[in-house]
Amino acid sequence: RKMKILVVDDTIFYRKVIKDILEELPGIEVVGVAYNGKVAVDKIKRLKPDLLTLDVEMPTMNGLETLQEIQNQNLDVQCLMVSSKTQKGSEITVQALALGAFDFISKPDVSDPNENKSLLKKEISNKLRGYSQQIRIKKLLKGSKTSSALGTSSLKTQKTPVSIHISPKAVKRTEKSHIIAIGSSTGGPNALISVLSELPANIGVPIVITQHMPPVFTSSLARTLNQKCELTVKEASNGEVLKSNFVYIAPGGKQMKVATDARLSKMIRITDDPAENNCKPSVDYLFRSIAREYGSKATGVILTGMGTDGKLGLSVMKSAGAVSFAQNAETCVVYGMPKAVIDAGLVDFVLPLNKIGREIKKTV
C-alpha cells in the first residue's frame, strides 16, 4: 500500500510546496495538512498517517512539543523534521532527533524558487527512500523470527545478521586502542547519546565523530551530547591538539581528519576538501586519517545511517589492524552504513546499540 503522509507546517507556502513534492513521488499518499502541532495531533488520530513532515518552528505547539505529545499519547507515527538553518531551528531539531524523530530536512535558502523546490524534492526523496528501506528491513526481521521451522530466514540469504556477532580474534586482542573513531548518519544523534553515555569521563583516549549534518546543526549536536554524557563534547576546530576524554564532532559542511604537528602531537585538521559519497563531512575521509596516524591502535565504529559512507575508510583501518564495531539491524533507524561494512566482512563486533558503548570501552 502507499505510504500515508501528513504535512505539518505553519506557513501556507511550505505546506503547499511539500504537499506538491510528495504528490509527485510514487507510492506516496498525502492524507492531509495541518498548520500547527495541536491540529496535527488531532489529525494523526483520525487519518492514521505512517509519517509526518513536521515543521520545527510553529506557534501554539512547535515541532518538539508535538513530538513529545505524540510520544505521551503513544501515537504510532514517525516524524521527519523540517527545519530552518537557524540556531534556534537547529537546537530544536537536534532535541527532536534525540527524542526519536526519524530524521530531518533543512529548508533551502537559495534565491531561485525553482531551485529551492528542486533541492527540497531531492532531500525529501532521499529521506523517504531510507525510511522505506528500513520498513522493509523491520518486516524481514519480524519474518525471520517466525521462519525458524524452515531452518533459514530470508535475511540470512542477504548476509544480514540478526543477532550478535563477535570475532574470537578481536576478543583475544591485547593491544589497546589510543583513539575511538565513530561514523553515523540517519538516527545518529540518538545512537551517539546511547554510546557516549556508556563511556566514563576518564576513558583515557580522544573520540572523533563524523555525523552527517549541515553547518550549524553540528554545533547544536555537540552541545546536546555534552549535556547528556560525562565526557566533554565539542565541535572540532582546526589546529587543536587532541586531548584524552574529549569528544570532537566534525563541523557540518567541512571535512575533518587527524594529523601530526611539528611537535609530533596528534591534532585536528578541518579542510574544505571535496565531498565523498556526497557527504561533507565524510566518514571515509576521517577513517583514512585514523588508519594513517594510529595504525592498529584504533577502534572504528559504524552506527545507524543511510548509504555506504565509512565502508572504504573502515577497510583501510582494518588493513592497518584496527578493531571494528557495527550496530546491528534490529536497533538501527536505517540499516545502510552498518550493512555495507558487515556484508564486506570488515566488522569484529556486530552488537545492539545498548551494548556497543561497554564493548568499546574494553578496547581502550
Image: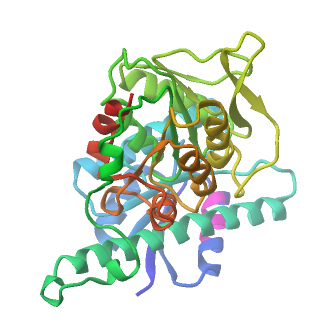
Q: Is residue 238 above or below residue 145?
A: above
Q: Residue furthest left?
A: 149
Residue at 62 percent across and 39 percent down: it is 291
Q: Is residue 2 above or below residue 352?
A: below
Residue at 65 percent across and 15 percent down: it is 241
Residue at 26 percent across and 59 percent down: it is 75
Q: Residue furthest top?
A: 263
Q: What range is drawn magenta here?
A: 14-19
Query: Foreground: 138 or 348?
Result: 348
Instruction: Give the x, y percent position of residue 82.
Output: 57, 52
Residue at 74 percent across and 18 percent down: it is 239
Instruction: Give the x, y percent position of residue 193.
Output: 38, 35
Query: Foreground: 325 or 214?
Result: 325
16 in the magenta segment: yes
Question: How many numbered callouts?
Answer: 0
Q: Does 229 sit left or right of 2 as displayed?
A: left
- The image's colouring method is rainbow
Q: Quadrant of the C terminus?
A: top left
Say if residue 50 shows up in the picture. Answer: yes
Q: Quadrant of the N terminus?
A: bottom left
Q: Find residue 251 and report its image quarter.
A: top right
Instruction: Give the x, y percent position of residue 218.
Output: 60, 34
Q: Does 363 sit left or right of 341 as displayed?
A: left
Q: Does 54 sit left or right of 249 as displayed?
A: left
Query: Foreground: 11 or 102?
Result: 102
**Predominant secondary structure in magenta?**
helix
Q: Is residue 61 above or below residue 201?
A: below
Say if residue 5 shows up in the picture. Answer: no
Instruction: Give the x, y percent position of residue 303.
Output: 45, 49
Q: Find residue 263 and report its image quarter.
A: top right
